[in-house]
Image (spheres, rainbow, N blue to C red):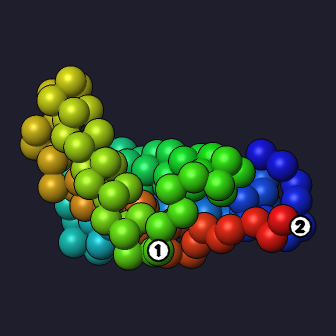
Amino acid sequence: MTENKTSRFTTSGFLKAIVPSYFFPFVSSGLSGYLLNKPALIHASYSTIALPSLLATALCFGILWFFQEKQILLLNRFAMTLILGVSMTLLAVLNIHIFELQAATWNIVLSALLGTAIVVMTKPLKKHNI
């Protein structure tokens, strides 16, 4: 990643995107699991809830950064959210079947979708001025 001050796709931008995408789902679900005395929810908070959100955010950030650098597929936020949301959902479902995580399907798919939507909505693509 380049450290271009005019770009939203920098190392600090990457960290600002991925840290909250793991931290907030982890804390919100982990705290709920603790208060409700549900150890399974506490375990899911750092594995099948927060981790898919982190991975989808990192992957989408990289894809958007690539599109921005190459100036390809510059779509509006809604269209890009839809395209990457469907892509991340399919990737999540593929991983669910590969790693036999059917019991956590809802957590994984929803977390991946949320991570995708947040990064796409906060990192819009723009045409370079030449």
> Mark 1: few, some, or many residues within 10 Å (few <14, many ≥20)?
few
Q: Residue furthest front?
A: 130
Secondary structure found at label 1 = loop
Q: Quadrant of residue 7?
A: bottom right
> Compared to 90, does 13 lie above or below?
below
Q: Between residues 28 and 79, which one lies in front from this camera angle?
A: 79
**Amino acid tagged 2:** Lys
**Amino acid tagged 1:** Asn
Q: Earlier in the sequence, mark 2 or mark 1?
A: 2
Indicate the position of residue 118 as horizontal and vertical percent values: 47, 71
**Camera-side mark, 2 or 1:** 1
* Quadrant in which the C terminus is drawn: bottom right
Q: Between residues 81 and 115, which one lies in front from this camera angle?
A: 81
User: Label 2: which residue?
Assistant: 5
Residue 76 disc label:
1
Name the residue located 22 percent from the left edge and 65 percent from the top edge: 37
24 relative to 40 in the view: left or right: right
